[in-house]
C-alpha cells in the first residue's frame, strides 16, 4: 500500500511541476492575420496579475499536496487544484485577446502555445494522479474526469474564446465541421460495431475449437502489423475493380475511394483487441464454475447465457473499449482516401501550413477518444457481476 501511495504522490508532483514550468514558457502567439508571422507572448505580457497569481497558487498547492499522505480530503483538494489550474489557464487565454488585440489589429488571431498546452497536460496529470487509486465508484471518477470538458464548454459558450484562431477557423467552417464530425462518428462507430459482430464469434470459436486458434490469431495479428495508411491504400484497387465489374455495387456507394474502403480497413484494425479479449474472456472462466452449472442441469445454451456470458462480458467490453479509442484515431487517416471525417481538417491544415486548422481537427478527435474511453469504462463497471466487482474492490 505504501508503494501505491508514493506512486500517486509522484504523479501529482509531476503535474504540479509541469504547471510551474508552464508559467515561464510562451503562452500565446499573436498573428496580425491568418497567414502572417506572429509574436510570442508569455504570461507576464497579459497583465493579468490576479489570474496569474491564482494559477501559480493552484500549482503551488498541488505541489504541497503531492508531498502529503493520501486521504479523502487530500484527493479532493488535488482535484480542486487541478481544475483550478485548468480554469485559470482558460481564463488567461480568454483575457489574452482582450489584452493583446487592439483596434489597430482587428484581424489579429491568437494561438495557444507550449505554456498553455503544458497547463492542459498538468491538469490531466494532477487529476489522474488523484483519481487513479481513489476509493470512488467508477461512475464518480468518469463524471469528475469530464468536468474539464464541461468547464471548457461553459467558457466557450460565453464567447470569451472567440479571438482564438482555432475558433475563427471553426466559425468559417461550422457547417462543414458538423458534417465531418458526424461522418467521423459514423465511420468509427460502424467499424467497431462490425468488428464486434465478427471478432466476438471468432474469439469464441478459437476457444471452443483449438484447431482454429492459430489461424484466427495469425490473421488478426498480421492485419495489425500493416501500417494504417498502407491498409487504406490496399483497399483501393480491389474495390475499384469490383465496383467496375458490378455496377450495382457502385450505385450502392462501394468504390475504390470513400466510405467503403475506409470501413473495411477500420473494421480489420479493430478486430484484434475484440477477438483477443473474447478468447481470453472464455479461457479464464474457471472449470469449476462450468462444472457447477452442468451439475445443476444446464445445457450448452443455458451455460453460455447464464454463466459464461455474464462472466465474459466485462473482458469483451474492455476489448471493445480499446478498439473504439483506436478507431477514433485511425478514422482521421480515412480522409486521405476521400472518406472524410475530422482528419480532413488535419490534412487540409498540413497542406495550407495552417496549424490552427490542424488543431481544429485534432482536438475533437482527442476529446472524442477520452469521452468514449470514460463512458465505456463506466459501462464495464456496470456490466461486471457484483460478486466479481466486490472482489476487485
Image: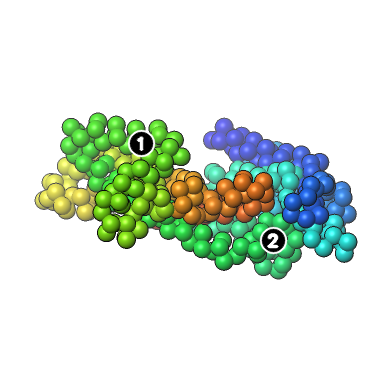
Within-10-Å neighbours for mark 1: few <14, some 14–19, many 20+: some
Residue 185 numbered tag: none
**Is residue 356 among what the camera can see?**
yes
Quick check: 186 left or right of 10? left
Residue 199 is drawn in which quadrant? Answer: top left
Q: Earlier in the sequence, mark 2 or mark 1?
A: 2
Q: Position of residue 376 (x, y in %)?
A: 44, 53
Q: Position of residue 265 (x, y in %)?
A: 38, 45
Q: Position of residue 384 (x, y in %)?
A: 36, 51
Q: Nearer the viewer, residue 306 or 43?
A: 43
Cα–Cα span, label 2 and label 1: 40 Å
**Is residue 49 among what the camera can see?**
no
Q: How many numbered markers are drawn?
A: 2
Q: Is 334 situated above or below 223?
A: below
Q: Nearer the viewer, residue 343 or 378?
A: 343
Quick check: 381 left or right of 276? right
Q: Position of residue 335 (x, y in %)?
A: 49, 50
Q: Residue at x 71, y 56 (%)?
A: 165
Quick check: 343 left or right of 97? left
For label 1, the SS is helix
Residue 133 is drawn in which quadrant? Answer: top right
Q: Residue at x 67, y 37 (%)?
A: 14
Q: Nearer the viewer, residue 344 or 135?
A: 344
For label 2, the SS is helix
Which residue is under mark 2?
A: 168
Rendered-image quadrant of the N terminus: top right
Q: How is the image coloured?
A: rainbow
Q: Residue at x 73, y 43 (%)?
A: 114
Which residue is under mark 1?
A: 223
Amino acid at each position: 500500500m505504501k508503494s501505491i501511495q508514493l506512486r500517486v504522490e509522484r504523479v501529482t508532483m509531476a503535474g504540479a511541476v509541469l504547471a510551474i514550468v508552464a508559467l515561464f514558457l510562451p503562452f500565446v502567439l499573436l498573428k496580425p492575420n491568418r497567414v502572417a508571422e506572429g509574436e510570442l507572448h508569455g504570461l507576464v505580457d497579459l497583465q493579468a496579475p490576479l489570474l496569474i497569481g491564482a494559477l501559480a497558487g493552484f500549482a503551488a498547492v498541488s505541489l504541497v499536496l503531492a508531498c502529503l499522505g493520501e486521504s479523502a480530503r487530500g484527493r479532493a483538494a488535488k482535484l480542486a487544484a487541478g481544475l483550478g489550474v485548468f480554469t485559470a489557464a482558460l481564463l488567461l487565454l480568454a483575457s489574452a485577446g482582450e489584452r493583446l488585440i487592439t483596434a489597430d489589429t482587428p484581424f489579429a488571431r491568437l494561438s495557444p502555445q507550449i505554456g498553455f498546452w503544458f497547463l492542459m497536460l498538468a491538469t490531466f496529470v494532477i487529476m489522474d494522479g488523484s483519481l487513479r487509486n481513489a476509493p470512488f465508484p467508477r461512475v464518480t471518477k468518469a463524471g469528475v474526469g469530464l468536468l474539464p470538458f464541461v468547464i471548457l464548454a461553459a467558457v466557450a459558450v460565453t464567447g470569451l474564446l472567440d479571438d482564438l484562431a482555432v475558433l475563427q477557423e471553426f466559425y468559417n467552417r461550422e457547417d462543414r465541421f458538423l458534417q465531418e464530425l458526424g461522418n467521423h462518428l459514423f465511420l468509427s462507430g460502424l467499424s467497431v460495431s462490425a468488428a464486434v459482430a465478427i471478432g466476438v464469434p471468432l474469439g469464441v470459436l478459437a476457444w471452443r475449437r483449438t484447431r482454429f486458434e492459430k489461424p484466427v490469431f495469425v490473421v488478426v495479428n498480421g492485419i495489425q502489423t500493416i501500417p494504417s495508411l498502407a491498409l487504406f491504400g490496399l483497399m483501393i484497387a480491389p474495390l475499384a475493380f469490383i465496383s467496375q465489374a458490378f455496377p450495382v455495387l457502385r450505385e450502392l456507394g462501394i468504390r475504390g475511394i470513400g466510405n467503403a474502403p475506409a470501413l473495411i480497413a477500420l473494421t480489420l484494425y479493430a478486430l484484434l483487441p475484440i477477438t483477443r479479449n473474447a478468447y481470453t474472456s472464455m479461457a479464464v472462466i474457471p472449470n469449476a464454475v462450468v462444472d457447477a452449472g452442468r451439475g445443476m442441469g444446464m445445457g450448452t445454451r443455458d451455460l453460455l447465457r447464464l454463466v459464461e456470458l455474464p462472466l465474459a462480458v466485462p473482458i469483451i467490453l474492455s476489448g471493445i473499449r480499446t478498439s473504439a479509442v483506436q478507431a477514433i484515431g485511425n478514422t482521421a487517416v480515412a480522409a486521405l482516401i476521400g472518406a472524410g471525417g475530422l482528419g480532413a481538417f488535419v490534412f487540409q491544415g498540413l497542406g495550407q501550413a495552417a496549424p490552427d486548422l490542424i488543431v481544429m481537427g485534432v482536438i475533437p478527435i482527442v476529446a472524442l477518444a477520452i469521452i468514449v474511453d470514460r463512458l465505456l469504462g463506466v459501462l464495464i463497471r456496470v456490466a461486471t457481476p457484483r460478486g466479481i466487482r466486490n472482489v476487485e474492490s
